[in-house]
Each structure stands twice: as C-alpha cells, then as structure tokens.
Amino acid sequence: MTAEHVDAVVVGSGFGGSVATCRLAEAGLRVVLLERGRAYPPGSFPRTQHEMSRAFWNPGSDLFGMFNLWSFTGIEALVAAGLGGGSLIYANVLIRKPREWFVANESYGSVEERWPIGYDDLAPHYDRVEAMLRPQPFPFDVAPYSEARKTRALKEAADRLGLEWTLPNLAVTFGNDGEAPVPGEPIREPFPNLHGRTRTTCHLCGECDIGCNTGSKNTLDYTYLSAAARAGADIRTLSEVRTFEPRAGGGYTVRYVRHVPQDGGRPARMEPVELTADRLVLSAGTLGSSFLLLKNRAAFPLLSERLGDRFCGNGDLLTFAMKCSEEHEGQTRTRDLGPTYGPVITSTVRVPDTQDGGDGRGFYIQDAGFPAFVTWLLEAANVGGTARRVLRMVGRRIRARLGRDPRTDITAELASALGDCGLSTSSLPLLGMGRDVPDGRFTLDADDHLACSWSMESSLPFFERVRSTMADIAHAWGGEFVPNPTYRLSRVITVHALGGCPMAASPEHGVVDPHGEV
C-alpha cells in the first residue's frame, strides 16, 4: 500500500510547531501536524487527586497525561505532552530577551557560542507573535486586580533593594479589546477556536501551570493552531513519531504510532502509520527534537558533530520565601502574600548582565502563585500546629459533654481548629531564570535513552547570584529563605530546557542555520 504523501509534516505542536504549521497552511501547503499528546478543551484539565495521578506522560505505563519529567545527572526537565505543547502549562510570560544580552561570540571551557542572529533579526517576529498571542500586562492599577498582594510585595521589595520591577506581557485575556478588564467575562475571539468552546477572561485562580480550565490563557491551541486548522492543516493528536529518513529522489519518510487508549482498564493499542512528505519540521522541543535526531542519526550522515551541544536549563531556579511577616502598629504580624490570587506570575524584577552594566550573567526573578488547593496541602504538612488546634477543640467538646460547657454552637471552635492558615498565606515561591552556561551535551546511553552531561559547576556563580537576590527579597518580606532541596544535591529543575540543536553560521559550530534548517 502506498504511504500517504503530503507537502509537509510538522512534529510537535509547541511554540515552534504551532507557528510552522500555521504559516505552512496559510501558504496553501497540505500540512500534517503530529502531536503525541491529547487535546485539552476548557474544563478538561485534571483537578481531582485521581485525575492528577493520571496526568503524566508515559505510554509504556498507559499514561497519556500532560506532564513529562526527564531526570538527568545534574538536572530535571519538565516538559508537556498535549495539543499546544508547553503553552498548556507555562506561566504565560512573554518577555523579549534584552538587546544587550544577545552575544555574537562567547567562549567558556570547550564550549564556543557563535550566534548568527541578534535582536534586530528577531524584532519583526516578536511583533508577529505578539499580534497573534495578544498579550496583556496584569492590570494592577484597577480593581479587583489591585488586590494582588504578591504583586505589591514584589514591587515593594524591588524598590527597597534597588531592583528594576515591571509588569511583563502575559498571554492571558484579562479583558476584551477596548473594554475594562473584568474576571469571568466571555472572550470575543478574532476567529473560532478549534475546540468550539467558549472561553472566559482570567478568574485569578492561580491554576495556570496545571492547565487553564476557563480558557483564559491565550495558549497555542486557541491561537496559532486554531488559525492553522482554519487554513486547512490536518492536526493529529496521540500521534508519536518514532523514525524518519530521507527518500530517494527527495523528501522524507516519517513513521509514527497512533496511541488508541481503551476503556475498561485495557492497555492502549498502538497503530503504526507511515507518511511521506516533501518537507519535515522537527519541533518536538529541546529534549524531543534532540532525542529524535540522535535516534535517527544513521539516516543523516552529514549531520553536524555539534548535535546535542550547548544544552542548559535557561538558568531556572525555584526557591521559597516562607513565614513572611510585617510590622503593624508596633507589633509583628503574619504577612499575607495572597499566593493564590491572580495568574501564577504577575510581575518580574530584572538584574542586569555584564553586557549592560551588571556583575555577572543576567537574570529575572518572578512572583509565583499557586492554586488554592495547595494551601490545604501546606497546612496539612504543618502537622504540629494543626494537631494542637484539633486536640484543643476535642478537649473542649469532651468537657461540654461532661456538662462543664453548656454551648451547643461550635462554629467558633471549628474556625479555631482550622487556624489562620498563616503558613500558606505567608509563603510564596520565587522563580528565577537567566543566562546560565550552556555547556551540557545530549547523547544516547547504551540502552538508547537520552542522557545529558550538564552540571551546575560552570554556572555556580550565576546560581549563587540568583539565590542571593532571592534571599534578599525573602528577607525584605520579613520571611525565611528556603532553597529548593535539590540545590543542596547540586541539582536544579528546568521548565525551559534549551539547546541540543544549536544555531550557527556553519556546521562546525551548530546544527541548524539562521533559518532553523539542518
């Protein structure tokens, strides 16, 4: 049987694949997009404990959820599986890399970066992306958004420490064009979304990173992918690419499996499919694209020796400000940072790079909220305080039953047992990201699993500067600074993995050219 032939196959529906699919379809080409994960319309993201236990990606264990965690020697990397890729679980921030932070040539150890493009080359593309994703800064100057205490707290800390504070663009709809922002209003879209569902403006629930069930985030499925579908793109979910190779006479053969989950606890079926195409776009993310090229390298003998090079975690660092306090009328009281109010990230501080007057590699730090249910987990973790309150309530009830307390309305006692939730309201994660050293390298191990050589060693001065600034912010809030426990093990976690297929002007220094072509 002859394989189906199309003009182009795009692998992955994240920030690269969605744009490529949209533009190829708009150009009139017959394009097939292959996405390994599911589609997630509004209301379909997991929230219950059972749903969250199934929200991970591992087809071998019959798991077809969003979250895919990779663990390497010195770093963990969290990526997404789903229609829209990482946009489904990211915190919406759209910051243009500062012009000064683009470097043409930079060397450290055996790694040499030679970038063939700069800010001016990307500026028109930044403009086009912003026109499609329609970002809006958090409207902190109007109610009810002005009640976001974490936003105010970060601004106050930045002012006190002399840091640059801004409200960055967020790919979130707070209000319809030309209207004042209002939570929970129907969004008027420029074209129908591919889910055929109504979206509403941001509900300020802090659930961005576990999937926005109200459709308030301007994720790729509502923007580029809906535009691509409108232009005729063939979008196939639960379709995981395994191999590809050049065809005699031009083009490529692509083989993938279609995952078919079954009801009744039966294991999913895998159906093999073969396509041929004149063009092949690999956009499976830093890990996915590098892994696929390494696995299929034998079919491409002219691939650059730089394949797998210049990996880093984008300087990602997660820490915590805990038990923050403030002075009020001569008394020290718990500081309520309102971690569950608003989108996950609302504002950012920027610390300059040596390229623009700083003392090292530059970075950003952002406030990081979390969903309301996390507060229950934090308070439950505070076993000692909770147990003491519950025991006091039980003791009072026993005395009442013995006739020593005539009251039957125990509402106040129940409120007392719950406590003031001071631990959860006075704590806030801090997120850092910036220019760490991209000296990691991807390879395949003896079992053909992806391996990575990156370690914190070269980037330690960078991470120590980020930690120091985060500690200053926590102390400015009257709180305790708590590093991520994995940091003590010389490990970090990234949600913005970079590298593996570096760009350069020649194959001696990179895998792809300035246009992204291998």
Image (tube, rainbow, N blue to C red):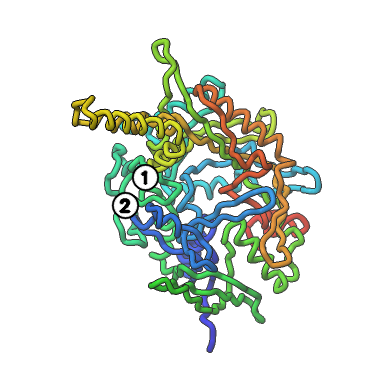
The quadrant the C terminus occupies is bottom right
Q: CA distance from mark 2 to mark 1?
A: 10 Å
View extreme (bottom): residue = 1
- Compared with 96, 283 (above or below) is below
Residue 464 located left or right of residue 163: right
Residue sitting at 71 percent across and 49 percent down? 454
Q: Is residue 223 above or below residue 244?
A: above
Q: Which mark is residue 173?
A: 1
Q: Amino acid at mark 2?
A: Arg
In x, y percent, where is residue 198?
29, 55
Residue position for label 2? 199
**Picture residue at 45% right of the left edge, 53% below the top:** 88
Q: Count residues near mark 2 (Cα–Cα under 10 Å), then give few for <14, some for 14-19, many for 20+.
A: many
Residue 304, percent from left and from top: 74, 62
Q: Is residue 486 left or right of residue 457?
A: left
Q: Tell me if label 2 and label 1 are in contact, CB under 8 Å.
A: yes
x%, y% of residue 124? 53, 48
Which of the 4 quarters of the picture holds residue 354? Answer: top right
Q: Is residue 58 visible?
A: yes
Please state which amino acid type lies under the numbered disc 1: Thr
Image height of 447 relative to 109, above or below: below
Looking at this view, name the residue that lies furthest to the right.
110
Q: Nearer the viewer, residue 376 or 246?
A: 376
